[in-house]
Amino acid sequence: MKKILLIVLTLIFSVQVKAQNSKISIAIKEHIKARIDNQVNVGVAVGYVDVDTIELFSYGKTALENGTKVNEQSVFEIGSISKTFTATLLALKVNSGEMSLDDPASKYLPKSVKLPTRNGKKITLKHLATHTSALPRMPYNFAPENPKNPYADYTTEQLYAFLNSCQLTYNIGEKSEYSNLGMGLLGHILELQSGKTYEELIIEHIANPLQMNDTRLVFTDAMKSRLAKGHAGLSETDNWDIISLGGAGGIRSTVNDMLKYVQANLNSDKIDSKLHNAMSLAHKTAYKNETQRSEMALAWHVENGKFLLHNGATGGYTAMIALNKAENKGVIVLSNNNESIDPVGIKIMMPTYPLQPILPSIAPIIAKTIKDQGIEEAIIFYKKTKAEKPNDYNFKEEELNTLGYQYMADGKKDIALEIFKLNVAEHPNASNPYDSLGEAYLDRGNQELAISNYKKSLALNPANENARQVLKKLNAEVKEEVVEVSQEMLDTYVGKYELAPTFHIVITTKDGKLLLQATGQPQFEIFPSDNNKFYLKVVEARVEFNANSKGEIESLTLFQNGQVIPGQRVE
């Protein structure tokens, strides 16, 4: 299943730039360079600002094929960072007296739309802005015709139809559970209240006052000419056109523009007073749950009572923004592929944060060996190199997986099949290699081996909906094994686990379910495959809880994207 350094110094608000004591250190630049050179990311652009320094750095290409160098004017999708813009618009309306955070959201919707309630309580604008509305992450009638541009055909009529049929599964305001639907609805409500489109509101109240001329939902011709094309892995993918739910993640921008936004949020007293007051309101804690160990401002995630954070991801882009108002510093990081760049932003904000070394991929070397000596010699070489030089190259499962799909796309299906076989042999406990091997067998018409491998993939990752759907189409029996874990055992896993100085996983339990929430990210239910092993359905990831000699849970291990990341229990 598919899965030369440029430093630019600029002035915003007439701040003097100091070249010494660079906050985007040489180590960070080398880390970014290694990400691009080793094909972890395609292009990365970074901006940093503090009280008297502004720095920009970019490296990589706007596209792997015939791309130009990314720079501070390259256009990216910022995904869910758009939610902080939506919160700022709401705060403007609240401060002007046009709206109240306690207003029922239904007040602004057509009378034909019946927003769900629960136990007599209504969803308010504040609930939408803090992910406490009890609305699901996405509407259940979301069925995109083009999965590569999934929001493009979702209409307002479909949104209303869903809201009229939606039934809430827990109490409003009870907990913070990330909802693109909720924030998209808030953006739509702002449209209805103002009589203007979400994009028009962004331009009028934020982009124009801050001179952010490349911040839009719809590409201008100038933005198109500087577009950093999105990539899923190393393959170009479509842009996401998010219109009806634009408030959840529809904005495109540049590092130059986003640095203006960062500085406005930090030094909001230097901007228009209305915008200053709105940003100040959006930064205030609006929801805090000690049991859930979560704290939310309006759209902004609050970490350690110190950082305001948000990241973003669409099909071909990742983004991260962080503010430390006490120290008057902030960062924006944008990338044009779907590999998270959060560690780069965290490292800039917290220099003690340890960046993981980036190793060169083994895939290009294997490809050259195939070309020069054939697939059999390449497999021998791979195994020998992995045994003798395990720390010299990146041998993670996705390296061979991506290589296999490249040969599939080139019509070299025999070579692809052998690579997928090798990946399964080298990573027998990973789900995705079996899925890919199953696809390769199915492409060759071997249904028996396709079914066998899809079943193995599904057994390792019960959340692999792709495998489940393929097996159904092949009329293959799929056994649903239900693992039940006692509430007493679930309670032993509750706590906070540190995977890095500013990155934690918080485990809670409710109604017999175990819930996981990572720093600055939504909360998700995790499902048991064994007493101490759980998996996520929203992404291919799993966690395993580890006990000490006394039987006490002291850590967890996160398995995701070929990475094995331990987390010590700290609370």
Image: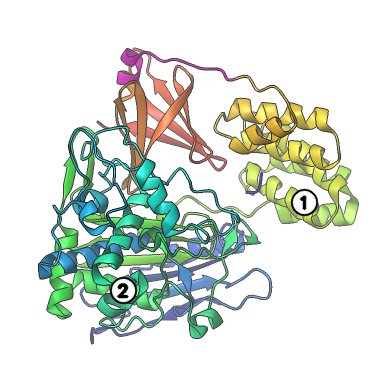
Q: Using the rendered image of the protein, determine whether residue 395 is visible from the camera's viewpoint.
A: no
At label 2, the amino acid type is Lys
Question: Residue 347 at x, y = what percent?
Answer: 36, 57
Q: Secondary structure at mark 1?
A: helix
Q: In the depicted view, which residue is nearer to us: 205 or 561?
A: 205
Q: Are marks 1 and 2 in contact (CB under 8 Å)?
A: no
Question: Residue 174 at x, y = what percent?
Answer: 21, 36
Residue occupying the point 43% across, 56% down: 157
Q: CA distance from mark 1 to mark 2?
A: 55 Å
Q: Secondary structure at mark 2?
A: loop
First in sequence: mark 1 or mark 2? 2
Q: Which residue is mark 2?
A: 196
Near mark 2 (Cα within 10 A), the count class, few <14, some 14-19 or many ≥20, is few
Above or below 184: residue 133:
above
Q: Is residue 484 magenta?
A: yes
22 to the left or right of 559: left
Q: In the depicted view, which residue is nearer to us: 234 or 200?
A: 200
Q: Which residues are magenta?
A: 480-491
Residue occupying the point 18% across, 74% down: 275
89 to the left or right of 314: left
Near mark 1 (Cα within 10 A), the count class, few <14, some 14-19 or many ≥20, is many
Q: Which residue is mark 1?
A: 366
Above or below 226: residue 185:
above
Q: Using the rendered image of the protein, determine whether residue 311 is visible from the camera's viewpoint.
A: yes
Residue occupying the point 26% across, 44% down: 133
Quadrant of the snapshot with the N terminus = top right
Quadrant of the snapshot with the C terminus = top left
Above or below 321: residue 119:
above
Q: Which mark is residue 54?
A: none
Q: How is the image coloured?
A: rainbow
Total numbered labels: 2
